[in-house]
Image: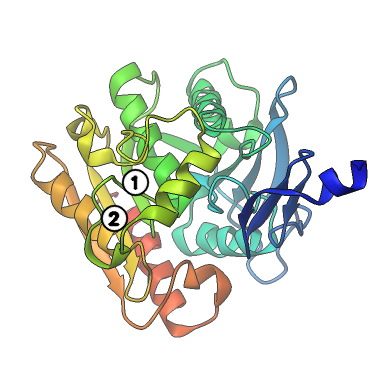
């Protein structure tokens, strides 16, 4: 009997994740990890830090080759994707991408390792991410103890970024800074790559939206539903309080989330928010193609666009 229960499926979101009625979680990919390193090609160094020993919240830090403490660098706080439930900050494809972005953008990067659903359902990932943001900000004064942040970061040039679910988190962190405040740092900009948003009323190529709604409630069972402002940001009364001055939204032509990205861009532009929002659509590509095919021409072009975004208008 026990073995029969163990094989009964409670939630099946193949080919990504499956949960059995006995609580066992089966992730079909995104389980591989790589250690921090010194990249032999770029000279980018990385290391792992524990932010909160009680929860296990941690991050991987990246610094470009031989930074000069007298020339402070922009800081990118990055939130990985994976539907809030797969992949990690230590996955090979994120490690490789952020190595490339650190050198191309000449930036320090903090890649946040938040706890994942379903073992840790939302809003835990949001709470972990906010704790990481506050930890980063603590280094603008005497409070923080991480040397790489204290020595090399210009806290007047801080950015949030993420892909897919990580793009969702990045937006919500910018909203939270706008409402709660964050001493000692200036959030200059935000990069949302193929952001995972939804809504009760489907738009564009989303179909009836049933699958998206079901997955959102899987990772956030206590959510109010698809028009939860955490998932459908344009219904949020605080939407126009996005804290940064500029936003870059990246979408891909074949991605089912493309129309949500465009919708976000258009609605933010007319929300009363006083910043500048841009969009980059890549033809012929699908969701997070830049992670899956990092050496392709389109991935290289998008990497350069993000790197330029981190450095434009800065002397």
Q: Nearer the viewer, residue 220 or 281?
A: 220
Place of residue 151 in the rendered image (x, y in percent of width and height, measured from the top left): 57, 34
Q: Which mark is residue 248?
A: 2
For residue 248, which quarter of the picture? bottom left
Q: Residue 285: x and y, percent?
A: 40, 78
Residue 76 visible in image: no
Residue under the image location 21 percent in, 36 percent down: 235
Residue indicated by mark 1: 190
- Where, quadrant-wise, is the N terminus in this rendering? top right
How many residues crowd mark 2 within 10 Å: few (<14), some (14–19), many (20+)? many
Residue placed farthest to the front in the image?
1
**Residue 297 vertical placement versus 72 (above, below):** below
- Marks 1/2 in contact by CB < 8 Å: the verdict is yes
- Residue 142, compared with residue 314, is above or below; it is above
Percent coordinates x, y for residue 200 in the rendering: 28, 45
Q: As displayed, is residue 227 above or below residue 53?
A: below
Where residue 213 appears, as percent x and y from the top left, is 41, 47
| 242 lies left or right of 190 | left
What element does badge 1 sit on?
A: strand
Name the secondary structure under disc 2: strand
């Amino acid at each position: 009997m026990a073995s029969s229960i163990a094989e009964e499926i409670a939630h099946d979101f193949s080919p990504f994740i499956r949960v059995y009625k006995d609580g066992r979680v089966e992730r079909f990919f995104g389980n591989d990890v790589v250690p921090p390193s010194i990249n032999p090609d770029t000279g980018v160094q990385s290391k792992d830090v524990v932010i909160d020993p009680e929860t296990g919240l941690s991050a991987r830090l990246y610094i470009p080759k031989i930074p000069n403490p007298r020339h402070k660098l922009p800081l990118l706080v990055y939130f990985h994707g994976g539907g809030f439930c797969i992949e990690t900050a230590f996955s090979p494809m994120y490690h490789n991408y952020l190595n490339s972005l650190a050198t191309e953008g000449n930036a320090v990067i903090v890649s946040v390792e938040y706890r994942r659903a379903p073992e840790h359902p939302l809003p835990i990932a949001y709470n972990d991410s906010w704790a990481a943001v506050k930890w980063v900000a603590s280094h603008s004064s005497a409070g923080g103890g991480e040397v790489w942040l204290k020595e090399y970061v210009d806290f007047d040039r801080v950015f949030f970024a993420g892909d897919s679910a990580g793009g969702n988190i990045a937006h919500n962190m910018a909203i939270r800074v706008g409402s709660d405040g964050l001493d000692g740092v200036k959030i200059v900009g935000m990069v949302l790559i193929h952001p995972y948003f939804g809504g009760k009323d489907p738009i564009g190529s989303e179909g009836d939206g049933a699958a998206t709604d079901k997955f959102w409630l899987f990772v956030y069972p206590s959510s109010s539903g698809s028009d939860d402002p955490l998932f459908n940001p344009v219904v949020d009364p605080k939407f126009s309080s996005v804290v940064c001055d500029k936003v870059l939204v990246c979408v891909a032509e074949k991605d089912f989330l493309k129309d949500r990205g465009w919708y976000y861009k258009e609605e933010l532009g007319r929300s009363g928010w006083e910043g500048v929002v841009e969009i980059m659509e890549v033809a012929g590509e699908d969701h997070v193609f830049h992670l899956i095919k990092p050496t392709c021409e389109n991935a290289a072009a998008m990497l350069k666009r993000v790197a330029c975004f981190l450095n434009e208008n800065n002397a």
